[in-house]
Amino acid sequence: MANTPSNMLPLGTKAPSFSMLDTVSNALLTFNDVKGEKGTVVMFICNHCPFVIHVNATIINIANNYLEKGIGFVAISSNDVINYPQDSPEKMAMHAKNEGYPFPYLYDETQTVAKAYDAACTPDFYVFNAENSLVYRGQLDDSRPRNNIPVTGTDLKHALDCMLKNTENTKVQKPSIGCNIKWKV
């Protein structure tokens, strides 16, 4: 397992726009299509990464709870599917259905979206406020496979709660750690 950290896009960055295939609905979706009234979580994940598998259930629970509060969620996979066929759009669709993803699972075929977000690893989390400005980026929480720390989603939930209450998030924003995005060569 690689231990690649997030690049930590500067706070205040405007959400890069995109138009990508939702592997479940086969529709092209843009940032405006997935954004929530009160904010948006953009997650870079993939099907096979042990770090993502480790937190998957918690991501789904958080999305289910915060979608009701006006937060939009979207997952994006940017991996090279030639060398990593387990991350193909067809397998992404099956994975999303099997896991019960309550959010779109988009395929970044050209990897331009991952580059625009300066994404480095899976999972990598970005929280944008209602004005589409970045207010959080980094980890879900301190749990990693085999470190025996329970998966709680504390860091992401704290960032979302601060945004919903319109209070400053003064907690240190730690980079996520995970598998590197599988870049095309």
Image: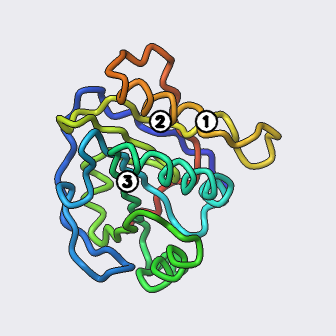
The amino acid type found where label 3 is placed reads: Phe
Please state which amino acid type lies under the numbered disc 2: Gly
Q: Mark 3 points at which residue?
A: 73
As drawn, 90 above or below 92: below
Specify the amino acid type for callout 1: Asp
Labelled pair 3, 1 in contact (Cβ < 8 Å): no
The x and y percentages for residue 10 are: 30, 28
In terms of image quadrants, where is residue 114? bottom left
Of 177 and 102, nearer the camera is 102
The answer to whether one can see residue 99 in this image is: yes
- Residue for point 51% across, 65% down: 46
- Residue labelled with disc 1: 141
**Residue under the image location 35 percent in, 71 percent down:** 107
- Residue 70: x and y, percent? 32, 45
**Mark 1 element type:** loop
Residue at 41% across, 65% down:
77
Q: How far apart are the two marked residues, 2 and 3, measured between alpha carbons?
A: 15 Å
Q: Mark 2 points at which residue?
A: 138
The quarter of the image holding the C terminus is bottom left
Tell which circle, 2 or 3, labels the residue nearer the N-terminal end. 3
> In what element is the residue under mark 3?
strand
Packing grade of label 3 (10 A; few <14, some 14-19, many >=20) is many
User: Which of the two marks, 2 or 1, is nearer to us in this view?
Assistant: 1
Q: Distance between the residues labelled 3 and 1?
A: 17 Å
**What element does badge 2 sit on?**
strand
Q: Which part of the image, by quadrant, shows the N terminus?
A: bottom right
